Amino acid sequence: MNRRDFSASIAGLGLAGSTLSLPAFAQAKPVEGKDYVRLAQPQPVPPGKIEVIEFFWYGCPHCNAFEPLIEAWVKKLPADVDFRRIPVAWREEPFVAHQKLYYALEGLGLLDSMHRKVFYAMHNDRMRLDKAADIIAFVAKHGVDQAKFTEMYNSFSVQTKATQARKLAEAYRIDGVPAMGIHGRYFTSGTLAGSAERALLVTDYLIQTIRKS
């Protein structure tokens, strides 16, 4: 989803799913500038492993459709790849609330059990979840301790992570999601690569490129 299109998606949240059923991956070497982009200013990465980032937004129907694909892909990643997700924020509302939701769940160790439920609530149950009260009521309904979640949601650490996420997305020049950032040097997406499936194959290619270098 392009940042210019997100308001239209909000208006019909849960009504416009994305199939991402685009042409299959062609067995040609990915082309820089076409299938992926090299960052003009490389970003720092943790030592020891190859960092891969999925930039996403809970309200994006394309991210919702992408989730089963990337879940299966992550399970097959080699041990030298460190994968993480970064929720984007193109403006204060509703993005920051969704960032804080993600990082609060992460802080409480609940991403494995709740991450997909958030997508389902927004895109199948048509819940907006763009206000703190609605978010807290939602997680409480799923058995999350309301007091602990509220404390984490409003914590300095969650706010700091949300700010860092915004800066990293800006550094990668992310203007649409889902997108994949590879080791502070490259990014790709379904739009660039031609499909969500091919974007993951391009990511595999870039992981190999980093490993060889």
Image (cartoon, grey):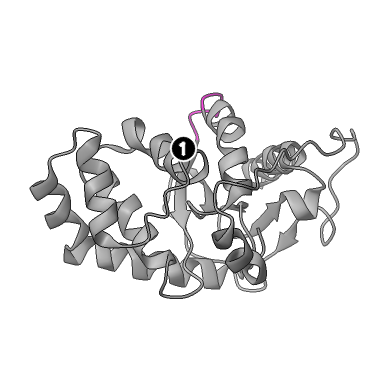
- Closest to the observer, 149 or 191: 149
Residue at coordinates 53% horizontally, 73% vertically from top-left? Answer: 170
Give percent across and percent down for residue 211. Answer: 62, 41
Q: Quadrant of residue 192?
A: bottom right
Q: What is the magenta range?
A: 75-80
Corner quadrant of residue 69: top right
* Residue annotated with mark 1: 120
* Up/down of 118 relative to 176, above or below: above
Q: Is residue 33 left or right of residue 202?
A: right
What residue occupies the far left of the structure in this picture?
A: 147
Residue at horizontal 62%, vertical 39%?
65
Q: Is residue 58 above or below residue 88?
A: above
Q: Main secondary structure of the magenta part?
A: loop
Task: State yes or no: residue 79 in magenta.
Answer: yes
Q: Secondary structure at mark 1?
A: helix
Q: For this view, does 81 lie left or right of residue 20?
A: left
Three-letter code for the amino acid on which mark 1 is drawn: Tyr
Q: Nearer the viewer, residue 117 or 124?
A: 124
Q: Quarter of the image containing the N terminus?
A: bottom right
Instruction: From this view, report whether residue 179 is shown above or below residue 109.
Output: below
